[in-house]
Amino acid sequence: MLRSLWISKTGMEAQQLQLDNISHNLANVATNGYKKSHAQFEDLIYQNLRQSGSATSDQTQLPSGLQVGLGVRPVATARDFTQGSLQQSGNTLDVAISGNGFLQVTMPDGTTGYTRDGALKLDAQGQLVNNEGYIVQPGITIPPNAQTISISADGTVSATLPGSPTPSTLGQLQLANFANPGGLDPKGGNIYAETAASGSPSAGAPG
């Protein structure tokens, strides 16, 4: 009876984690660049009461054994980086990543964070930043007298300046790719951090 209660407890805890994970996914259904996660489980160790192949007589063996499982445990929350749908935002500075890759931002502690949230803005210094105010790498500054700003499909940021009929190139966004993006550590605020499991990033121009 005590074992049955323990097994039931592991199942309840696993289902609670599953519900928490589903709720988190639903809560972020409108979050830019959010990638849903799936809780993954595995069965616990088995108590082997009768071994498969044990002799039942001099001429016969058990075709199968008798094992009693001891429950379940969560082992991972796997993130799904499948491409989502692209939507028009109406904001000139917004970008969407089609395919693999992450924008790189400078975190307050000086480390690099990675995000698929392309809702970009300008800070007081005219630097391209994300919604949290983190500078997008490589740092691109828009002159205050820029008349029009555009970001092309290859990440080139251009602006039309007074007295110049042609747009001036101000910089180019870079995308970071990982061998195992599922190994990235989610930090909140649509930011991921590099880990040993994700591998080191390789950066390059979009396209």
Image (cartoon, helix red, strand yellow):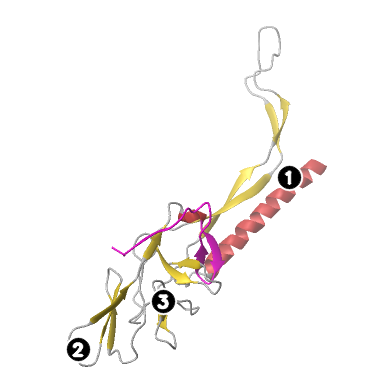
In the displayed structure image, the side of residue 95 where residue 38 appears, left or right: right
Instruction: Tell me the distance, in whole angstroms, between the alpha carbons under discs 2 and 1.
Output: 73 Å
Q: Is residue 63 magenta?
A: no
- State the residue at coordinates (36%, 70%): 96
Pointers 2 and 1 in contact (C-beta within 8 Å): no
Report crowding for label 2: few under 14, some 14 to 19, many 20 or more residues within 10 A (C-alpha). few
Report crowding for label 1: few under 14, some 14 to 19, many 20 or more residues within 10 A (C-alpha). some
Q: Residue 7 at x, y = what percent?
A: 73, 45
Mark 1 lies on a secondary structure that is: helix
Instruction: Tell me the distance, in whole angstroms, between the alpha carbons under discs 3 and 1.
Output: 46 Å
Mark 3 lies on a secondary structure that is: loop
Q: Residue 20 at x, y = what percent?
A: 62, 62
Q: Which mark is residue 119?
A: 3
| The N terminus lies in quadrant | top right
Q: Is residue 106 above or below residue 75?
A: below
Report crowding for label 3: few under 14, some 14 to 19, many 20 or more residues within 10 A (C-alpha). some
Mark 2 or mark 1: whose residue is earlier in sequence:
1
Q: Is residue 160 above or below residue 63?
A: below
The residue wearing badge 1 is 7
